[in-house]
Image (spheres, rainbow, N blue to C red):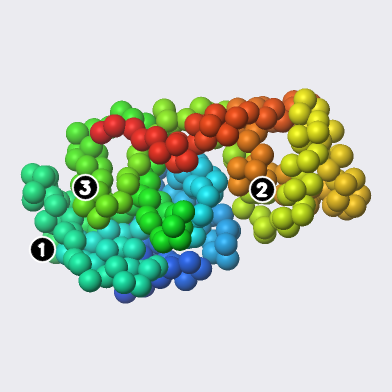
Amino acid sequence: MRTEKRFTPKVLERFQREGRGTGTYADYTPWHRVSRGDPSSKGRSHLIVWRNRQRELLSDQEWGGLNFAGMVPGLVDLVEQFPINQDPAPHDLSRWQVGCGLKRFPGTLEIATQLGIRHPQLTEGDITHTWTSTTDLLLVIRNANGSLELLAVSCKPSSKLSKRAKELLRLEKTYWNLRGVEWLLITPEQYEKSVGLTLRRSSPWGFDEPASATAMRIACTVVRSAPWYPYSDVIRQLTDSLGGETYRHEAQRALWQAVWRGLLPVDLRRGWRPHQPLSLISREAFVSLNPILARRSACI
């Protein structure tokens, strides 16, 4: 993934020239990217195509965060590696919603001073460059009254963090809270490992082209009529209901998208084996399995 050994001021200047961190929807470009020209991150990176854009995830934890975020109702857009402003700037929601760009909010330089935190920067020889902090995932959600709101999510491999890591997360959290945006810190301690694995296995269908409403209704009917049948039998019955063996992919896509959209509250702690059933649980229990849906965050 990498040809340059580390971040340097020249690398960050290149990011700016390339328009990193700009745009929305399919035109968004992440600040940090999965490419040979970027310094590598720890762990495995992932490229996932969803909603007409390739998502660039720098770790397994971000992949898990994307899977949880993909289940949020009313999700309008999701951007990864989102750069937060160093200087005072309009509300970040102004990218998506006209009319919220009049008031200016403090940037990370001012916030760091207020918190008594040393703002991160890079130095190479005589050149110093202020570091641009980023938020792993920024969700744009249409709420019940029809307006848009933001939800910021940081994904880390553990809740055990160094003092400096906690300072930088506190800087990020304060940035969003001053804008009235909820910020979540998601670590493996906030969810069961089996849930994360189930979402990884089902993500090819969850992030596939949208299934038809009719196919998802049929999937719901089939699963509810056979709540303790093995998964393989459910898929076989659903495939037959949709038109035969050539519709097997459509059957799995319709079933898992019905699950991801909350139409089928399935126990996501299930294993991968086809003989295991799709057990239905309450809506409340289903939501509790997803830290983003439940708004569950680690402490710093």
Closer to the chain start, of discs 2 and 1, is 1
Task: From the image, state whether disc 3 or disc 1 is nearer to you.
Answer: 3
Q: Residues within 10 Å of mark 1 (few under 14, many from 20)?
A: few
Q: Which residue is mark 3?
A: 174
Is residue 32 or residue 293 the one in the foreground? 293
Q: Which residue is mark 2?
A: 257
Disc 3 marks a residue whose amino acid type is Thr
CA–CA distance between discs 2 and 1? 54 Å
CA–CA distance between discs 3 and 1? 31 Å
Q: Residues within 10 Å of mark 2 (few under 14, many from 20)?
A: many
Circles 2 and 3, Cβ within 8 Å, touching? The answer is no
282, above or below 74, in the image? above
Q: Which residue is mark 1?
A: 126
In this rendering, position of residue 155 left or right of residue 172: right
Q: Where is residue 69 drawn, in percent x and y?
A: 49, 47
Q: Where is residue 122 drawn, in percent x and y?
A: 19, 56
Disc 1 marks a residue whose amino acid type is Asp
The residue lying at 35 percent from left, 41 percent from top is 184
Task: From the image, state whether disc 2 or disc 1 is nearer to you.
Answer: 2
Is residue 136 or residue 122 the one in the foreground? 136
